[in-house]
Each structure stands twice: as C-alpha cells, then as structure tokens.
Amino acid sequence: MAHARNLPVPAVDSVEEKEHRLENLLGQVRSCHECELGKTRTNPVFGFGSASARIMFVGEAPGYHEDRQGIPFVGRAGKLLDQLLDRIGLNRSQVYIANVLKCRPPDNRDPLIEEINHCRSYLEQQISIIGPAAICTLGNFATKLLTGKSDGISRVHGRPQPYPDFEKTFIYPVYHPAAALYTPSNLRALEHDFDNLRDLLSNNTQAQDEPVPLRSDPVVETPQGKADPEQMGLF
C-alpha cells in the first residue's frame, strides 16, 4: 500500500486552531461523494475526541450503529474499547478515535482499495492536525495502510514501530476490539497490549525499527491447541 506522497508536517497549532481545522475537514467529509459509499451512508463518521490527543485510535470502517449515530465505535466493540481505555486510565475525551473509511460499507463488507484511496487523505489530514505521539491501529486494514507493510496483525500486534510519515509519531498495532468479543485469547492479548501501551506513553518510549522490549507476551491458545489464525478484515 505504500507509495510516495507529499504530506503536511504535524500541526503545531493551538487547540482552538486544531479544532477549527478539524471542523473544516469535517465539512469536506460531509460533502464528499467521491465513491459509492457517499450515496449509501446515513451519516459520515468523521472522528471523535480531543484535538490535542497524545494517542489516536484508528479502526477500519463504521458499522451499523456508527452509521446511524455518526460517531465511531458506539456498538459492542466500542464498549470494549471504552473498557480498555478505562483500564489504562483514559477515556474518549482524552484520545481521538477515527476510521480508515468515513462511510459504512454495505453489509459491513471489507473496504475496497478504491474506497481506501479516496478516504486516506482525510485520515492523513486528521493525523497531521492532531499530531499524536502514538497511533494505535486497530486490526489489519489500519495497520497495513499506515505502516505501508503487509505484515498481518497477528504478527505485529503489541510491537511499536515508526510511523513512516512523521518522525515523532509511532504506530502501535493491536487487535480490533471486535476480534476479542468472542475469542478469549484475543481479549487477553488486547488487554496485555493496552497495558504495554500505557507503559510506552508514560515512559515516552521512542519507536524503533526492531521491536522494543516489553512485558512478555501472554500464552495464547485456541480450544484446538493450534496457533491463532491470521486476522482477516477486522480480525
């Protein structure tokens, strides 16, 4: 997915200026009909949270409840995300939550390449305006898009790496909360990765090309005793 592009440097604006720039970008998203999703959505789902957040969470695409309310992560996966935030002493007003796509794909299907290409500039502008210290990518689509690598989430979750476009921002991939709703092993891994994220932020750890030493990975087993399958789509 990686390709050369000219991105703005992270913003150094005041909070008020950042909020104003995000509001202008929201207006662009509301009027966007670059792909078919603009014709089938109920509401665009732009993003939610603090314009000066140190950490930004990026998921895949809105679902049914998000499309109805215009707010990201308001379904069951969103409730789990709230619990994980509370686990590390944060809440939605202190972080920023967005998706790769701003409109819901019909029947919650996977995003298409052309849809991602139409929408990616909105996400990149959000990142540039907010200028977070960390981008926590939730699942495969967000991780592969922002890292520019093909490594699946099962391989890279919980391991910080540099964000290719902004030197002072690191990417921290984790499983999508939806992948943990019915799979206890994924939930344990997600809780473990959130604990490490808290430590990374509190220690102001620099991202490196090689995984940095963190807490030991938990033992993850499936009921059949086989290795977890590669996360597909959200998972």
Image (tube, rainbow, N blue to C red):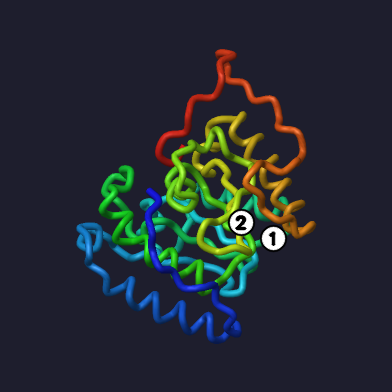
38 horizontally vs 51: left or right: left
Left or right: residue 91 versus residue 74 is right
Q: Amino acid at mark 1?
A: Leu
Circle 2 SS class: strand
Identify the residue at horizontal 71%, vertical 32% (top origin). 217
The residues bearing labels 1 and 2 have C-alpha atoms spaced at a distance of: 19 Å
Residue 68 in sight in this render: no
Label 2 sits on residue: 170
Q: Secondary structure at mark 1?
A: loop
Residue furthest right in the image: 203
* Rendered view: 7 above or below 234: below
Left or right: 20 as drawn, with respect to 1: right
Please state if 211 lies on the left or on the right of 50 as rendered.
Answer: right
Residue at point 57% right, 46% down? 173
Residue 195's label in the rendered image is: none
Residue 28 % position (x, y): 32, 76
Q: Of label 1 and label 2, which has the lower sequence position?
A: 1
Q: Is residue 175 above or below residue 224?
A: below
